[in-house]
């Protein structure tokens, strides 16, 4: 029906967002609630899942209070969520411990065990994803080793969006292909659990939810959740997807070769493909598309917006309001100051949980603005390192841009200059792409859209930043310097970790 609406929930790293979208693919309104990450020894990074649920309920009630006439028009609910987490729940869906987030790196010993027993290459070829201490597969093993009583009590091991779907429907037995593949327990080609690998590691496949296309309707809004939302019960709920796959659709990247960058707390570049790209050097990873009919090739920078937020806080700045002004105070190249954005380790293309942030080339002439611009340029160099791997397979001359960092015109220009691409600003709001992707998947599930391409047809480019050829030689030289620093420091990062 043309008057039907879709409610989408996005459980992000720093907060939960709930949005309403109409049948034309337009976002009508949204509400957000922040939540905290608690950091601890050994690389711990945890969140309370009840904070997510409280945010989802508060957001939805706020939307319904602002638009009570829309209550009866919500025809479907979609969910997106942060990936690479691990949440153990009992048979009723009650969390048994805090959620281990994507940046939790405590499972280093378990990653070594997987490499010894299974082999990193075998894991990559089977799942399309790179073995890493932060993978949910390794986190499950960490719980088995360090919290055996909890492991025995667990009924399901979930991702963030699966927990929200379960609280809405009453069933915690489902996930989607994108989260399952990234968790490294799904055969990405057959789209079935990798039971042989799980068995060799001593993990029970029955603890893992059934994988579905994100467009599948897996339940309906139950009475308790409906009361918490101030909505009628019985609204269809889709399986939902990981934020990476949802953002791909939300960026309008639905055709082979479409490439985009999500510039958020964590950032990534992805390029749509028909088949997984199994890189011999294991520098990139693959996620199935929301409909399960294709995939995209991804490379992730772990602490992108996080690094810039950190630098702004150190400088006493409140948020991103003056970012463009401060960046303009320093010339491209930061007078030789280079930053490695490894505050929380790094993923693509180096996959090193021990790596940490570095400022290189500090001189007395460098002021506060130099350090901020170097941080922005360092994140952009990290994204170029990802793009260079993708370019080995396919040319990339333009790149769509989504995510909160895309609000900065100066950062958009730095990205265009460093990566030598046209950066397309999308009609999707800077921070709305994952919500849009989750909504479109649910819309396909209830027949509002024939397919994802049809749902994404209204997503267009709203502006473009072209690379400045005058700074390209400088950035090319500085990228070479940037690229030389990690190999020179890799062993030192490992020795530092031994001291912790």
Image (cartoon, grey):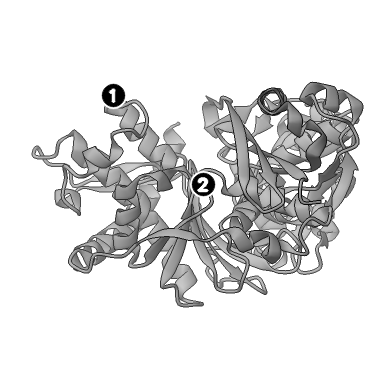
205 or 99, nearer to the observer: 99
Q: Residue at x 46, y 40 (%)?
A: 344
230 lies above or below 357: above
Residue 429's disc is 2
Q: Is residue 476 visible?
A: yes
Q: Residue at x 53, y 33 (%)?
A: 43
Residue at the spot of label 1: 316
| In the displayed structure image, the side of residue 62 where residue 180 appears, left or right | right
| In the displayed structure image, the side of residue 302 where residue 120 appears, left or right | right
264 lies above or below 221: below
256 or 43, nearer to the observer: 256
Q: What kind of element bears circle 1?
A: loop
Q: What kind of element bears circle 2?
A: loop
Please rate how many residues cluster around mark 1, counting C-alpha atoms within 10 Å: few if below 14, some from 14 to 19, many from 20. few
| In the displayed structure image, the side of residue 363 where residue 337 appears, left or right | right
Q: Residue at x 29, y 47 (%)?
A: 339
Q: Position of residue 30 (x, y in %)?
A: 61, 34
Q: Position of residue 44 (x, y in %)?
A: 57, 31
Q: Position of residue 62 (x, y in %)?
A: 66, 24
Which numbered disc, 1 or 2, marks the residue that appears first in the sequence?
Answer: 1
Discs 1/2, front: 2
Residue situated furthest left in the rendering? 365
Quarter of the rendering containing residue 485: bottom left
Q: Residue at x 68, y 31 (%)?
A: 99
- Marks 1 and 2, how far apart in space? 28 Å
Q: Is residue 214 visible?
A: no
């Amino acid at each position: 029906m043309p008057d039907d609406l879709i409610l989408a929930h996005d459980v992000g790293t720093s907060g939960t967002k709930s949005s309403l979208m109409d049948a034309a693919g337009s976002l009508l309104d949204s509400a957000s609630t922040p939540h905290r990450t608690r950091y601890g020894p050994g690389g711990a990074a945890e969140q309370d899942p009840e904070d997510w649920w409280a945010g989802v309920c508060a957001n939805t009630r706020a939307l319904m209070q602002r638009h009570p006439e829309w209550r009866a028009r919500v025809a479907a609910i979609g969910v997106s969520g942060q990936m690479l987490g691990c949440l153990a729940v009992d048979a009723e869906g009650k969390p048994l411990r805090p959620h281990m987030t994507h940046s939790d790196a405590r499972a280093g010993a378990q990653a070594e065990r997987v490499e010894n027993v299974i082999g990193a290459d075998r894991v990559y070829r089977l799942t399309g994803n790179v073995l890493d201490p932060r993978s949910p597969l390794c986190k499950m093993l960490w719980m088995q080793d360090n919290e055996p009583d909890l492991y025995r009590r667990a009924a399901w091991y979930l991702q963030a969006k699966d927990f929200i779907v379960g609280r809405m429907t009453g069933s915690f037995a489902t996930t989607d292909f994108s989260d399952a593949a990234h968790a490294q327990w799904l055969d990405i080609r057959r789209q079935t659990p990798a039971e042989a690998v799980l068995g060799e590691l001593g993990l029970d496949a029955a603890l893992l939810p059934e994988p579905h296309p994100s467009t599948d309707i897996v339940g309906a809004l139950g009475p308790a959740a409906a009361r918490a939302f101030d909505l009628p019960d019985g609204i269809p709920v889709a399986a939902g997807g990981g934020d990476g796959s949802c953002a791909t659709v939300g960026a309008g990247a639905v055709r082979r070769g479409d490439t985009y960058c999500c510039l958020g707390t964590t950032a990534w570049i992805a390029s749509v493909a028909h088949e997984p790209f199994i890189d011999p050097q294991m520098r990139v990873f693959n996620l199935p598309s929301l409909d399960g009919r294709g995939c995209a090739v991804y490379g992730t920078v772990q602490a992108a917006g996080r690094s810039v937020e950190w630098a702004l806080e150190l400088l006493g700045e409140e948020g991103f309001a003056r970012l463009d002004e401060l960046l303009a105070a320093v010339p491209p190249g930061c007078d030789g100051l280079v930053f490695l954005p490894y505050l929380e380790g790094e993923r693509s293309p180096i996959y090193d949980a021990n790596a940490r942030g570095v400022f290189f080339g500090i001189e007395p002439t460098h002021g506060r603005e130099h350090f901020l611009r170097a941080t922005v340029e360092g994140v952009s160099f990290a994204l170029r390192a990802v793009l260079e791997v993708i370019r080995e397979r396919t040319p990339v001359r333009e790149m769509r841009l989504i995510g909160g960092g895309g609000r900065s015109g100066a950062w958009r220009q730095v990205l265009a200059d460093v990566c030598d691409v046209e950066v397309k600003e999308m009609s999707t709001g800077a921070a709305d792409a994952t919500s849009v992707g989750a909504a479109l998947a649910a819309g396909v599930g209830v027949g509002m859209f024939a397919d994802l391409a049809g749902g994404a047809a209204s997503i267009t480019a709203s502006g473009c930043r072209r690379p400045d050829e005058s700074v390209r030689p400088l950035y090319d030289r500085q990228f070479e310097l940037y690229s030389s620093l990690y190999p020179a420091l890799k062993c030192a990062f490992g020795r530092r970790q031994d001291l912790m």
